[in-house]
Amino acid sequence: MEVNQSNLARHILPTSATMLGVCMTVISIIKLLHIGHPGTLIDKLLALDSLAFLISAVFSYASMRSASLTSLERHADLAFIIGLIGMGICALLLAFELV
């Protein structure tokens, strides 16, 4: 199923908001477990991911409210991909204790 560009923001907004919540939950768990130095690095990376997902949500919402959809949707899409890549890196760091 191909998603055309005008509907992309409708998919990005709820997903990026959910991923923002996931980042906040993992940060809270890391703080509760008192992991130490690796935890502080990972929670800082997850905080940056949260920012990327927040930017993505704001751009996607703005693109739905604006007449010029394509530019804002591209920015929302890029911020979302950056957030996903960051979460993937954090997951690897946590799973394999690479820090």
Image (cartoon, grey):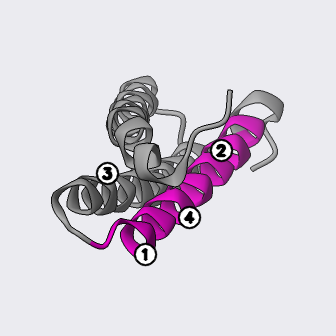
Between 94 and 80, which is closer to the camera in this rendering? 80
Horizontal side of 95 relative to 17 (left or right) equals: right
Which dot marks residue 90?
Answer: 2
The mark closer to the camera, 4 or 2, is 4
Q: Residues within 10 Å of mark 3 (few under 14, many from 20)?
A: many
Question: Which is nearer the N-term, disc 2 or disc 1?
Answer: 1
Q: Find disc 4 in the rendering and name its residue.
A: 78
Mark 3: secondary structure: helix
Q: Is residue 45 magenta?
A: no
Mark 1: secondary structure: helix
Question: Which is nearer the N-term, disc 3 or disc 2?
Answer: 3
Magenta segment boundaries in residue numbering: 68-93
- Does the magenta stretch mainly form a helix, a strand or a loop? helix
Q: Residues within 10 Å of mark 2 (few under 14, many from 20)?
A: many
Rendered location of residue 24, percent (x, y): 34, 36
Q: Give the quadrant of residue 17.
A: top left
Mark 4: secondary structure: helix
Q: Amino acid at mark 2?
A: Cys
The mark closer to the camera, 2 or 1, is 1
Q: Give the quadrant of residue 95.
A: top right
Q: Amino acid at mark 4?
A: Leu
Image quadrant occupied by the N terminus:
top right
Residue, x 33% and y 55% (percent of image)? 60
Between 22 and 8, which is closer to the camera in this rendering? 8
Question: Which is nearer the N-term, disc 4 or disc 2?
Answer: 4
Rendered location of residue 70, percent (x, y): 44, 69
Q: Find disc 1 in the rendering and name its residue.
A: 71
Q: Amino acid at mark 1?
A: Ser
Which dot marks residue 57?
Answer: 3
Between the residue at mark 2 and the residue at mark 1, the CA separation in whole angstroms equals 29 Å
Dots 4, 2 in contact, CB < 8 A: no
